[in-house]
Amino acid sequence: MTEGRHFRQVDVFSAEPLLGNPVAVVHDAEGLSDEQMQAFARWTNLSETTFLLAPTDPAADYRVRIFTATSELPFAGHPTLGTAHAWLEAGGVPAGEGVVQECGVGLVQLRRTDGRLAFKAPGLIRSGPVEPALAADIAAALGVGRDEILDIAWADNGPGWVGVQLASADVVLGLKPDFAAMPVDVGVIGPYPEGSECAVEVRAFCPHAAGTTEDPVTGSLNASLAQWLAGGVLPASYTASQGTVLGRRGRVHIETDEAGSIWVGGDTLTTILGTAAL
């Protein structure tokens, strides 16, 4: 007989239900095999499903494994916020001032900022220039001229992102990518006019890493884009919009602290609470 495990589905990066990015969180996942975790993640058909485990590092409050429908990720942003929300809501008590998550990239710090959970962006695995041939292929897949890309760089903190800067939010919203031709997972960003509610519009095209085509609201991508552009092209702290073309209203709050670290925050709320037969 299968065992019922506590389960939450958390909407992340929205203060209103159904307008953010959902993550499935399985509590007390000890004893589940890799195959069981992957099968459940495939069944939920969400961009990510997470499994809460006891930490192996004494500095961590909990350990999490993060699965897409097709593979395991060392780190992802909206699952980090959603899992921390679920752990706290279920009665988790941090050992220190903030929450410390253990995952594939190591320890990730979380804190509450203005009532929202925020994670400290982990270091980039890969940064710097993109090879000219790859940049040309990305432009073609996005359906824009290479000269329309203001800047392009590796911005990989685990999922494998390449960041693309375009001239405006309207250009970003108007993209109709050829996903079959997209050589890597790509995050695109463009500014709104000064004085707008949000500084930028972001879109995440991920036909490779997430087993989907476009992710609604993406913490890892917003973290790496901020590490690339905040304090230079963009303000040190700002709010990003994402998910507009998918009928979502994601809001990602970027803050740069005095030490220069990037914090990525968003609202979180539980939309489904129950047990999962695993």
Image (tube, rainbow, N blue to C red):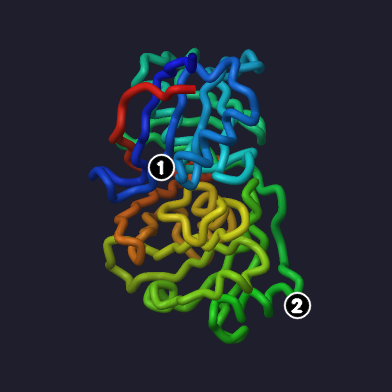
**Element under disc 1:** strand
Q: Where is residue 248 in the image (x, y as percent from the top left)?
A: 31, 56
Q: Name the residue under label 2.
A: 133
Circles 1 and 2, Cβ within 8 Å, touching? The answer is no
The circle on residue 67 is: none
Which circle's residue, 1 or 2, is located before the other in the chain?
A: 2
**Element under disc 2:** helix
Residue 258 shows in the view: no
Q: Which residue is drawn at 30% across and 56% down?
A: 249
- Judged left or right of residue 53, residue 238 is left
Indicate the quadrant where residue 39 lies. top right
Residue 29, relative to residue 248: is it above or below?
Answer: above
Question: Around disc 2, counting alpha carbons within 10 Å, would you say few (fewer than 14), some (14 to 19), or many (20 or more)?
Answer: few
Q: What residue type is labelled 1?
A: Gly
Q: Which residue is drawn at 67% across and 68% down?
A: 183
Q: What residue type is labelled 2?
A: Ala
- Judged left or right of residue 50, residue 129 is right
Indicate the quadrant where residue 243 lies. bottom left
- Front residue of 276/54: it is 276
Q: Position of residue 268 (x, y in %)?
A: 33, 37
Residue 181 shows in the view: yes
Q: Position of residue 84 (x, y in %)?
A: 44, 28
- Front residue of 3/259: it is 3
Q: Mark 1 points at which residue?
A: 265
Residue 121, relative to residue 226: is it above or below?
Answer: above
- Judged left or right of residue 209, residue 9 is left
Indicate the quadrant where residue 117 lies. top left
- Judged left or right of residue 191, residue 262 is right
Q: Which residue is drawn at 60% across and 16% down?
A: 31
How many numbered marks does the figure carry?
2
**Which is more foreground, mark 1 or mark 2?**
2
